[in-house]
Image: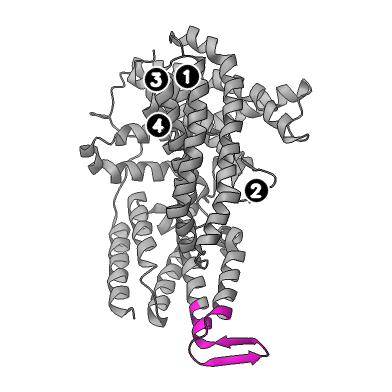
Amino acid sequence: MIDNIIIGKYVPGSTVIHRMDPRAKLLTIFLYVFIVFFANNGITYFLLGLFTFIIILLTKLPFSFLWNGLKPVIWIVGFTFLLHILVTKEGDMLFRFGFFSIYEEGLRQGFFISLRFIFLIFMTTTLTLTTTPIEITDGMESLLKPFKKFKLPVHELALMMSISLRFIPTLLEETEKILKAQMARGVDFTSGPVKERIKAIVPLLVPLFISAFKRAEELATAMEARGYRGSEGRTKIRQLKWGAIDSIMMASILLLSIILLLLRA
Amino acid sequence: MLKSKAFKLVFVGMLSGISYLLMALNFPLPGLPAFLKIDFSEIPAMLATILLGPIAGLAVEAIKNTLHYIIQGSATGVPIDQLANFLAGLFFLLPFAFVFQKVRSMKGVLFGLAAGTISMSVAMSLLNYYFILPAYTLFLNMPQMSIAEVKQVIIAGILPFNLIKGTIIAIVFLMIYGRIKEWLQHKFNVQNA
């Protein structure tokens, strides 16, 4: 539970996909979410599946990690599949038992639509499995730079996100400390009626806010003492590097998009 | 202190961190659909609104949801849950900020909370009708819901849920704010915070 809150789903590794520029990964996913809806016949679904499968293979992650991403929604996939089979009555009849009958078109649609959904989940899960939150933040800052012209404070937002990410483990530790201190005084957080549990959150949050404010003050003073004055002329410890693999990935996803557009029914 | 840019950024970043943690500790309400979960992540955003203004409050909401998406991901692959949460926060915070800026006192906080709760409930009912529920059915590939079904979900789920959520958040916020108000006023020299 606690690991899940702090590091999320990231699995360390040094595969090609792990080492890709986060900007390339974000752009690929963004395009993928659109082109998944282009596929509508056997060949387009096959190509989309092949692309997804190659990426999954390149991450060298055990399949169980991807399966975990699918688990919360698997019953919806199954339910949709069944529904398409039972409701769509087009094409040739394949099977009949009393009232119950299966048609070719229903089976086809149910199968394809479930596949599309599974591909989408697999690709987005791959992103969070192979990229740390801080890398995603850096990538987003870099990609959103053009929006500075429209007064979007890109640098400031990215800085605030990095500060949050840096302090989430600290804040969680603080929360646990306060929880234990309150439990030692006899507060019960885990049982009792909802009303009591909501009341119990007050003595937890008040010290948490106070200590966070003090920490914020210290960090801000330290930043000003070192001359922080916004994004102008600021250097970075984590440099983003666009490599050959990133260009190859962008070329492949663009090519895939064009092929899907040409081959779709 | 509150005027310095570095302090504003660090402060909003820190409150977003707390907000993200509180969002992770969510729980469903008995008697309502399980996908409607309540959490206290709006409280840090409200503190940011009171101390630094509505933009800071919205920044907390935006960062919280972005963090949630890049750390936890989304069941649909696309961040619909996070977008819905951000919109709920937006429609809760803006009326709250508006009333509080006109009446900078405890009375302002109270009326602001009431306005926020009503605005969030109405806005989320409409947004679910026109945008969020259709987006879910599209990405989860569920069959299109009929208009009667959508209305049923909104009247029996979304609307009462948001009214209860707003009220609970308001009560908890008042209990917390009552206790740290004087500390904040003393610390940051805020008049009538």
The residue pinned by badge 2 equals: B32
Image height of B168 relative to A78, above or below: above
- Rendering quarter of residue A196: top right
Cα distance, mark 2 to mark 4? 35 Å
Cα distance, mark 4 to mark 1? 29 Å
The answer to whether residue B69 of the structure is visible from this angle is: no
The residue pinned by badge 1 equals: B108
Residue type, mark 2 in image: Leu
First to last magenta residue range = A86-109
Cα distance, mark 2 to mark 3? 34 Å
Residue type, mark 3 in image: Gln
Q: Is residue B38 magenta?
A: no
Cα distance, mark 3 to mark 1? 8 Å
Residue type, mark 1 in image: Gly
* Letter of the chain that mark 4 sits on in the rendering: A
Mark linked to residue A160? 4
- Rendering quarter of residue B5: top left
Pair 3/4: label in front: 3
Residue A41 place in picture, x, y as percent:
40, 80
Mark linked to residue B101? 3
Residue type, mark 4 in image: Met
Say whether marks 4 and 1 touch (CB < 8 Å): no
Cα distance, mark 2 to mark 1? 31 Å
Pair 2/4: label in front: 2
User: Viewed as shown, does residue A121 lie left or right of A251?
Assistant: right
Mark 4 Cα shell of 10 Å, populated few (<14), some (14-19), many (≥20): many
The answer to whether residue B58 of the structure is visible from this angle is: yes
For the point 57% across and 25% down, the residue is B173
